[in-house]
Image (cartoon, rainbow, N blue to C red):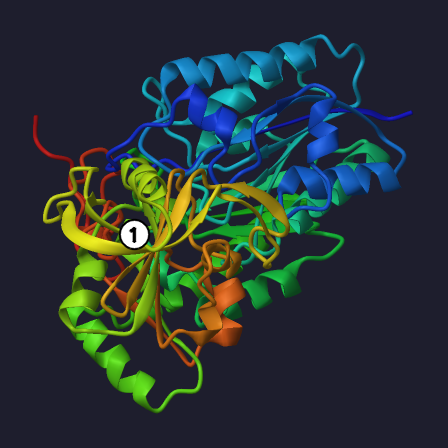
Amino acid sequence: MTRIAVGGFLHETNTFAPTKATFADFQHGGGWPAMTQGADVLKVMRRINVGLAGFVDSAEANSWELIPTIACGASPSAHVTKDAFERIVKVMVDGIAAAGPIDAVYLDLHGAMVTEHLDDGEGEILARVRRVIGEDVPLVASLDLHANVTPAMIGHADALIAYRTYPHVDMAETGRASARHLALLLKTKQRFAKAFRQLPFLIPISWQCTNDQPTKGIYEKLAALESDGVPTLSFAPGFPAADFRDCGPSVFAYGKTQADADRAADAIVKLIESHEDDFDGKIWSPDDGVRHAMELAKGASKPIIIADTQDNPGAGGDSDTTGMLRALVRNKASAATGAIYDPESAKAAHAAGVGATVTLSLGGKSGIPGDEPYRETFVVEKLSDGRFIAPGPYYGGREMEMGPSAALRIGDVRVVVSSHKAQLADQAMYRYVGIEPTEQKILVNKSSVHFRADFEPIAEQLMICAAPGAMPADTASLPWTKLRPGIRIKPNGPAFNPPSR
């Protein structure tokens, strides 16, 4: 029987964010399943939208024996602590080393991990695994669409395969694609030639959505270029908030010959570069955006949905800034917004009870410039223990643990307050505290794009607003220091020049 060691360790690192990812964050998981080890990995990683879960499905269909090590992820944030990284990677690498004779390794990684002591987290993971298994055992990893792929990652892996949708509704499918490529490696007993290209400009995450052009057309062309000669081809637009040399978009191809791989990679690079002007769009200020949404809502039959993009906990925000809430209240909007991460306020709401009024200093505790706690009196409309299923396309049926939570009301604005943070990307994240999203005039979601998978079908119109937050919509506004010289810090923007020492 074919024996394959598997594991998962996912983190998207915003080096400009206020809060680091500790070992406890990976134990809880945030929007990811809680940390599991050993045989428990295969019990949890089933029928959910996660790369490893998709790989497990395919492995069973192929009658492969899986040797699970560890599976964990944490909400995007600042650097992964050295303690967390070393403890998790030790379990993974030791588990692979102790597995006995194995035929291959599959890892579910993100591709944009920066730690306190390493700029290239995944490059180090793959290097350590390669040292244990040697050069002859195939090593394949799935990556997030937002991976900042490095030469070390390409060098140590036999194949890297990235998601193709944003919102990421194909995470499990990417695990299955990884299994198909691994089956090909095992059957042919050959290695494919690699082509790796880094693009010359950063792409802001708001314009990476694959529901829209130009990204939609790029992925259609990418899929059309795959063939027997080029079994897999990936475009990773990158996560443009990680201050290290290899941050940015990349293309990587695997071909029967070097010429096959080079030809496919160069074709996609040429297409992406031809669309540099198109990676841009309208972003509203909080007040202008709310007022425009209120006008649109007058004639709408469905909610106007606003992305509070700069406080997206899926991009390193703490999900606690108050700029959009203030704009809603200031303009007397009828709306719901969430989720504001504030365990203290959630605890106070639970102590006060349903129907009570409670004065809070809500949110604003992450120290983001231009933001502060919102001190007001709220009505407690509903309370929840924070446990529910998120059945929409992004979370894909995950069991959510948001901790003690509440629906608060001020004027005609309802606010979801939670004790854990996760990107508001599922309608259930309103319903669990008694707010029916389809009945709201305006919804303001702390998300950039992932919410679209579940909310676009119920939206009259989508908008993007930029209130203070850890993930600027304009990548040129970040204080870069370590990027590779010459990369443009936004589409058609200025080239990066390292600060003089």
- The three-letter amino acid code for the residue at tag 1 is Ala
Q: Quadrant of the N terminus?
A: top right
Q: Is residue 204 left or right of residue 384?
A: left
Front one among 303 and 136: 303
Q: Residue at x 26, y 80 (%)?
A: 294
* Visible residue check, residue 173: yes
73 vs 345: above or below:
above
Q: Position of residue 314 (x, y in %)?
A: 40, 46
Q: Position of residue 132 (x, y in %)?
A: 64, 11
- At mark 1, the secondary structure is loop
Q: Residue at x 30, y 57 (%)?
A: 309
Q: Residue furthest bottom?
A: 299
Quadrant of residue 57 in the image? top right
Quadrant of residue 139 in the image? top right
Front one among 233 and 401: 401
Q: Residue at x 80, y 22 (%)?
A: 103
Q: Residue at x 23, y 40 (%)?
A: 485
Q: Is residue 182 left or right of residue 300?
A: right
Q: Quadrant of the C terminus?
A: top left
Q: Is residue 284 left or right of residue 190?
A: left
Q: Position of residue 473 (x, y in %)?
A: 25, 57
327 vs 352: above or below:
below
224 vs 122: above or below:
below
Q: Callout 1: few (<14), some (14-19), or many (20+) C-alpha neighbours within 10 Å?
A: few
Question: Which residue is identified by label 1?
Answer: 356
Q: Position of residue 287 (x, y in %)?
A: 15, 70
Front one among 339 and 275: 339
Q: Is residue 278 left or right of residue 479?
A: right
Front one among 490 and 12: 12
* Visible residue check, residue 260: no
